[in-house]
Amino acid sequence: MPDTSIVAAFDFDGTISTTDSLRVFVRDTIGTPRFVAGAVLAAPWLIGAALRVVDRGTAKAAFLRASLGAREKAQLERDAQHFVAHRLPRLLRPEMLARLRQHRALGHRVVLVSASPGLYLRPWAASVGFEAVLSTELAYDEQARFSGQFSKPNCWGPEKVRRLEAWWGDNPPRVLFAYGDSRGDREMAARADHAWIRGQGRLMPLTDADASPRAS
């Protein structure tokens, strides 16, 4: 029987996708010359983030500000639709889409938790059956242009757990599965009853025995 008290939380970049989807999206949207120029302009922030002296979200916003500029929201949404239809499908891992379908077939709630923008993740996630998308969100000014900032904190590391807990509110799952691939998923994995990090073993089987809470 469907069990909606079980939640499966999936990271996107490197977990469901084969690479950093944000870099691909920006490069496809503005072209290689502007992409490279944006990276050069944002280099102080990007280097600072690599050295862990600048917040990752601050560096990401600086890169998007330098590369996308004050792009109109309507244009970005059209860019996202084109990306989802023509480029994103080539970045997806079939085995992770199969795992998503397996959770859905068991009646579990599935949620995407990603540091990449909801701008393009939301339309894609809706098409494959995710119930919700918890992601980094772009901010826009009064003229509906990208402001160069985020409207919510970068959805990475501890922020992923905060977003999950805010999403389920007073109804936490009986069992939480988490799928990730990097340091940014460590806190989400620690919060889960069953966690899988790419490169650290095979996917756990989904059986009745595995749909039980972790012993405390």
Image (cartoon, rainbow, N blue to C red):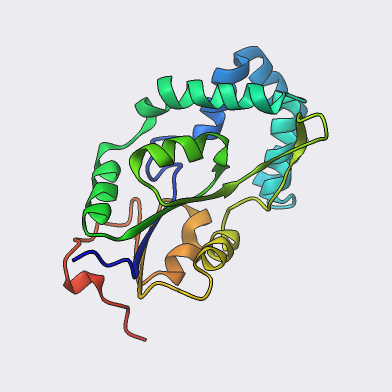
Q: Position of residue 173 (x, y in %)?
A: 39, 72
Residue drawn 68% across the image and 51% down it: 152
159 left or right, relative to 196: right
Eyeballing the image, is 11 above or below 177? above
Residue drawn 38% across the image and 37% down it: 127
- Most extreme residue toward the right is 142
32 left or right, relative to 55: left
57 left or right, relative to 112: right
- Most extreme residue toward the bottom is 216
- Displayed quadrant of residue 212: bottom left
Q: Position of residue 49 (x, y in %)?
A: 69, 46
The answer to which of 46 and 163 lies nearer the viewer is 163
Residue drawn 76% across the image and 35% down it: 148
The quarter of the picture where the C terminus appears is bottom left
Query: How many numbered badges does the structure rendering display?
Result: 0
Eyeballing the image, is 110 above or below 120? below
The answer to which of 45 and 125 lies nearer the viewer is 125
Residue drawn 64% across the image and 44% down it: 137
The quarter of the picture where the N terminus appears is bottom left
Q: Does residue 194 appear in the picture of this structure?
A: no
Q: Does residue 136 appear in the picture of this structure?
A: yes
The answer to which of 13 and 36 lies nearer the viewer is 13
Q: Position of residue 164 (x, y in %)?
A: 51, 63
The answer to which of 145 and 159 lies nearer the viewer is 145
